[in-house]
Amino acid sequence: MHQHRRQRPHRGISPRELRDLQLRVRTEQQTPAWKARYAVRSGVEGTVNEFTHGHGMRHCRYRGQGNAHIQQVLTAIAVNIERLRGLSPTEEPPTPRRPTTFQDYLDQREIPRLKSWRTLGT
């Protein structure tokens, strides 16, 4: 014979309690304080998503905690460089670079430069 275990009473959330909770949460979500907290969370979640899906960080390429850490740090540096590159330009355009000595030589002799060469400063 097996003994019956005494079951604990199970109490769930009533539909009314659930509705009241949803109304409270939805009201709180309209406050500026909640929106400020969520903006931070949204930014963090976006960054994590970018790393896992855009840069393959769900799995490490290397074995060992030290190597995995180096991979994460280098990937983070690369992502920061990509983000900095995409910043909008400043109000004033940067001052152009001075022509190189070789470019000056070509210009003085009126020798045309190839289109693939940098022509900043001319």
Image (spheres, grey):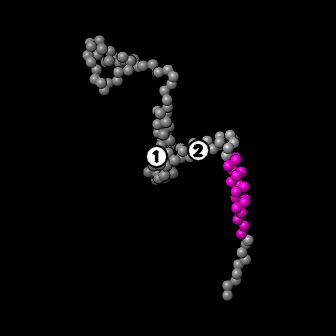
The kind of residue tagged 1 is Gly
Magenta segment, prevailing SS (helix, strand or loop) = helix
Magenta region = 10-28
Position of residue 71 in the picture relative to residue 39 (left or right): left
Question: Is residue 27 found inside the magenta-colored segment of the image?
Answer: yes
Residue tagged by mark 2? 42
Q: Secondary structure at mark 1?
A: helix
Position of residue 90 in the picture relative to residue 27 (left or right): left
**Rendered residue at 36%/16% (across/down):** 122
Q: Residues within 10 Å of mark 1 (few under 14, many from 20)?
A: few
Residue tagged by mark 1? 54
47 in relation to 114, above or below: below
The kind of residue tagged 2 is Ser
Question: Is residue 49 found inside the magenta-colored segment of the image?
Answer: no
Residue 49, percent from left and from top: 51, 47
Q: Is residue 70 or residue 72 the one in the foreground?
A: 72
- Name the image quarter holding residue 97: top left
Q: Residues within 10 Å of mark 2 (few under 14, many from 20)?
A: few
**Rendered residue at 50%/20% (across/down):** 92
Residue 119, percent from left and from top: 35, 21
**Rendered residue at 67%/46% (across/down):** 29
Of badges 1 and 2, nearer the viewer stands 2
